[in-house]
Image: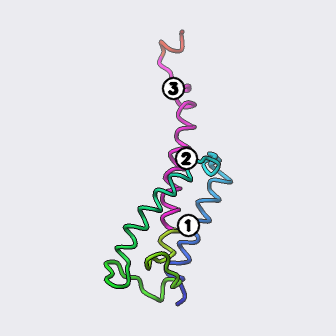
Amino acid sequence: MTGIGYTLPALVSVVVVVLWELTYLRTGLFRKSTYWATMAIVFAFQILVDGWLTKLSAPIVLYSPDHVSGIRFPWDIPIEDFFFGFSMITATLLLWEHHKKRKPKQQKMIQTPNEADE
């Protein structure tokens, strides 16, 4: 079990998303309790759905043992699924927050001729 095929990209995705927020976007999302509540809700539903899809007793989704770490928690869910889930949801929310911060600035820059005269 090398884990390189799925584990390494999963871990890299988390690092990239966190660094993107801390060095470029700087939305402050990680300081918001609503973000962490959102992530708790997402992970709760991910556990239900992923647990059903990946249970070893009757799997619907199969993972090659050569491409995962072998760590499964809870209910046989490969830990890598949580890393990718974190990255996808967090990246989406970061883009949303970044867009919200930019929108008022863009609206000020785009004025109709009538608004500029007022």
Q: Which element carries disc 3, helix, strand or loop?
A: loop
**Viewport quadrant of the C terminus:** top right
Q: State the image coordinates of residue 53 (x, y, percent, origin top left).
A: 35, 74
| Tag 1: amino acid | Ser
Q: State the image coordinates of residue 54 (x, y, percent, origin top left).
A: 38, 77
Q: Mark 2, mark 1: which one is toward the viewer?
A: 2
Q: Which residue is mark 2?
A: 34
Q: 10 Å neighbourhood of mark 1: few (<14), some, or many (≥20)?
A: some
State the residue in front, 115 or 63. Answer: 63
Q: Mark 1, mark 3: which one is toward the viewer?
A: 1
Q: Which residue is mark 3?
A: 110
Distance between mark 2 and mark 1 Cα atoms: 22 Å
Compared to residue 114, the image places residue 27 above or below, namely below
Mark toward the start of the polypeptide (2 vs 3): 2
* Marks 2,1: beta carbons within 8 A: no
Q: Which residue lies at the image location 33% right of the left edge and 81% below the top edge? A: 59
Residue 48, label in figure: none
Mark toward the start of the polypeptide (1 vs 3): 1
The boundaries of the magenta stretch are: 84-112
| Tag 3: amino acid | Ile
In the shown orientation, is residue 27 left or right of residue 103?
right
Residue 13, label in figure: 1
Q: Which residue lies at the image location 53% right of the left edge and 68% below the top edge? A: 83
